[in-house]
Amino acid sequence: MPDSRPPRTPHVSVSDRTTEGNRTGSWKYLHPEYHDRVAPCRERCPVGVDIEGYLSLLRAGRIDDACDLLLRENPIPAVTGRVCDHRCEGGCNRAQLDGAVAIHAIERALGDRVLDGPLPPPAERRHAESVAIVGSGPAGLACAYHLVRLGYGVTVFERDERPGGMLRQGIPAYRLPRPVLDREIERIEALGVVFHCNAEVGRAPSWPALVGAFDAVFVGIGAQRGRRLGVPGEALPGVRQGLEFLRAVNEGGHPDLGDDHRVLVVGGGNTAMDCARTALRLGGRGTTVTVVYRRTREEMPAIADEVADAEREGVRFCFLAAPEEIVATHGHLVVACGRMELGQKDASGRRRPIPSGEEPLLLEADTVLLAIGEEVSLDGLPLTPRTEGGIHANAWGATAETTDGRVGVAVFGGGDVTGDERTVAHALAAGKRAAIGIDRQFRARQGVMPPLEPEALRIGEQGAPSMTRWRGDDPIRRVAPLNEVVRPRDINLADFARAPRHRDRHAVSRRRSWSHAPDGFAEVNLGLAAEEALAEAARCFECGVCNECALCMLYCADVAISRDPAGRFAIDLDHCKGCGVCAAECPRGAIMMSLEVPS
Amino acid sequence: MKKVIVGNHAVSWAVKLARTEVISAYPITPQTQVVEELSEMCASGALAARFIKVESEHSAMAACVGASAAGARAFTATSSQGLALMHEMLHWAASARHPIVMANVNRALGPGWNIWADQSDSLSQRDTGWIQLYCETNQEVLDSTLMAFRLAELVELPVMIVLDAFYLSHTSEPVDIPDPVLVDRFLPKREPRFRLDVKDPHAFGALVRPDDFLEMRWHLQDAMRRVQPTLERVEDEFAALFGRRYGAVESYRTTDARLILVTSGTITSTAREVVDAAWDRGEAIGLVKVKLFRPFPAAALRDALCGAERVAVLDRNLSPGVGGIFAQELRAALYDMPPEDRPMVYGYVLGLGGRDVTPQTLEDIIDRTDDMGVPDRADLWVGVKA
């Protein structure tokens, strides 16, 4: 050992100059890329709202921009925030941690904010073409809204006294206060949509007159006829179609059912829940409302929150019972119900009820409301019905209808009438789909054929068409957009702190008697206060979209990720070894690894 | 300030007083309390350190290496299987010259599964380039941990503080907690010669070819050579501030002793009693405690044992195929003595896996050594049941 003179070699292995000259990036066979992917809520939303986008704007405090983004796809957020079954929440990746983001409540808060603001200015008319909309339910309203915003002339024909269709006739005021609906429609009117009420297309105006006066027609007449039960005694006094009952009540008649009135509601869907809760509000002391359903609670098509609210208000349920006969005796009705049990799954994926062989159940009632579904009635319209009812529409919402002489007038349809799923959200989507189809057809006639196929507008593989994609003017900065949904496995839950979901405020709990309650039809679910809604928005994971959390920079073992003054991240591919730690650590799945392409 | 604390917490207190900046550890019995207390100190803000949770001891040491490379004062603690899992990273820490301090609670390696005191875990790592300091009391644990940071940073080598499972780790003793102001004076902020800096990037630990590797190892050995004098200087500084010193090797009543017991760890305390009792009876029995095991204090031990007729080494460890490791190292050290001064070495293997070593055990060893002529084997086993 040379004790006297130590060697000049350093005591540790350290390079004497920078290592940047060593292009270790050449070792990799994968490289990371930042992408904007599709949050599952967006794909699940039947209306195709950029939910993640507006939640992200809310986090940034840009509330007005968030409202604008929402309004790009959804014409009536204050309505859907109240009555939509919010499937978006069913896909929320936050459910893996501490509960889905309460998107419906945030949407409602934004919708209400929009309603509290000024009416929008009229939309700029950019095209000569004009479109007739038949029916002013959610499908018709959406089609009219999107078309007027695209620059077309739009006239809506509504058979009823006031526009709104099933939103007005079917949904009780305690779920959708009428001032909210009125104001939403007022906003659409302010954009320049002309509403003709008390106008029954087929009579006045006649169908030929309509197609003669417009360049396209959209049919969104819904499904307005209650389905018959098909059992003896259905025509007895006291047996009513639930939809007619709701329509009468919603149009202002609040008959007092009196004390000790017994109401049976047949069915398990949203109409049944609306009938039951409405009947409860009209009854006096001792009034009972019982829902009779042939399957069990699990198979009920009604929105779960509505069932819970009905139960909380005192509605009773009688499951696995199917009415077989109704008889009148001693001044009241007796409904004989066959007892059922659940068999194999049917086409709807629900277990089919089959007779259990037990003794029939005899239920006494003063009123029986039938709410077992609605059928399309094309009365007066010369359209070709499908065997399963309603009319056919393709992926652009176009029907195969001829135009009675006038060349070039196409008939579009959407909503219940074209067999779309029977929710407000699906009707809104169908109206938008047809608006895009109509715009596409008009532009094609001018020789401008947009290259997009319907699939290209779809958000994710399963989602609704996006109006923003159709217009091609996404206001959100998107980095390398990728139409791929972020799955739970793409999320790094370890990076999120628990924060419980905010719960909607409710106005009433169970009460003994509803009669003489002046606020019986006042809104029940009060949503979230504005500040709660903002806090709830902050729970969003921002799935698939970089929010500049900078964890990738922190974890990069090669210090190969940097940030420019504008806040954008850059990957130094000369030194990135493709280890994938950034992609694995990204909390929200916004970094993906791609194979190197050999040069 | 005096506190009655267990040995594990004596480590925690020292790590806190040392203003350690990064702690990364994985729990293992009997070490768990060390990092449990530290994690609470970090959580409460009493200690402004980054506590890095990891999934294994290998990662714990890797995190300490990274932290130390970035210039931080880093600490970890482990035991037994955990230390074995760190093995690769122990070499890295030493060869990259990171002054990391680690507490290792001596525990047997399984199987048979055993959580009790046994030095085989730390002694298995003797060739990794770590300084090893074996402690006898909780006070010595705290003081040695503080001195370990100073020593490590002066010679740029990692230090392992070693304490016996349960006899120290889980036994409460009164411990004087030094004044933090004085500790700050004793232990200034670390000033590394090299540190990771993204603004001035260099490669650390990269390929070194045959034409330079030998020299790097020369430096490592040179640093080891400087450990004992540096430890003396550190102990001087510590004693000046806190009034306590221990020494790399401690001789206890060895003057004129015909037989000297050589011990480490807590067996030393038992041996002190036995030696006192022997002198009371008029028997000249001495004691040499080995605190510093790596680098092995060969010269100090030659001096301490010179003149004794017989030396009984008490090894609570086993190098299978050889016997006790302290005895093995001691024999090698004594070989440099003139044959006429060289004592006879009796290497006893005892107390493995936490087997109790009582005063009677040591009395029996003294008698057995007296009765034996030239030892007939290198490993003399104590207490093996028939």
Image: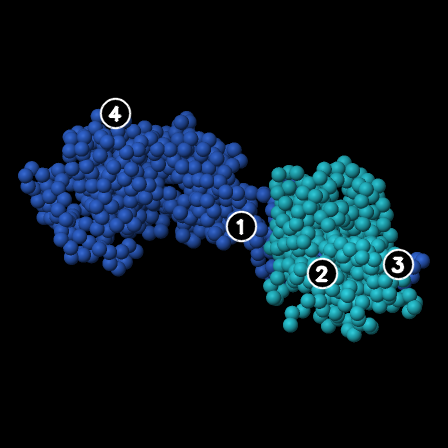
Chain colours: A blue, B cyan
Q: Is residue A396 left or right of residue A567?
A: left
**Rounded to the nearest whole Å, what is the CA distance between mark 4 and mark 1?**
51 Å
Q: Identify the residue at the far left of this view.
A: A330
Residue B164 lies, in percent from the top left, at: 69, 55
Going from the N terminus, do you reach mark 3 or mark 2 first? 3
Q: Amino acid at mark 3?
A: Asp
CB atoms of marks 3 and 1 within 8 Å:
no
Going from the N terminus, do you reach mark 4 or mark 1 first? 1
The chain holding disc 4 is A
Q: Identify the residue at the far bottom of this view.
A: B376
Q: Residues within 10 Å of mark 4 (few under 14, many from 20)?
A: few
Q: Amino acid at mark 2?
A: Gln
**Rounded to the nearest whole Å, what is the CA distance between mark 3 and mark 4?**
109 Å
B25 vs B50, nearest the viewer = B25
Look at mark 4 in the image and give the residue it sits on: A518
User: Considering only vertical position in the picture, is A181 above or below A573?
Assistant: above
Residue depth check, mark 3 versus mark 1: number of the one nearer the observer? 3
Residue depth check, mark 4 versus mark 2: number of the one nearer the observer? 2
The chain holding disc 2 is B
A226 vs A262, nearest the viewer = A262
The chain holding disc 1 is A
CB atoms of marks 2 and 1 within 8 Å:
no
Circle on res. A144: none
Q: Are marks 3 and 2 on the same chain?
A: yes
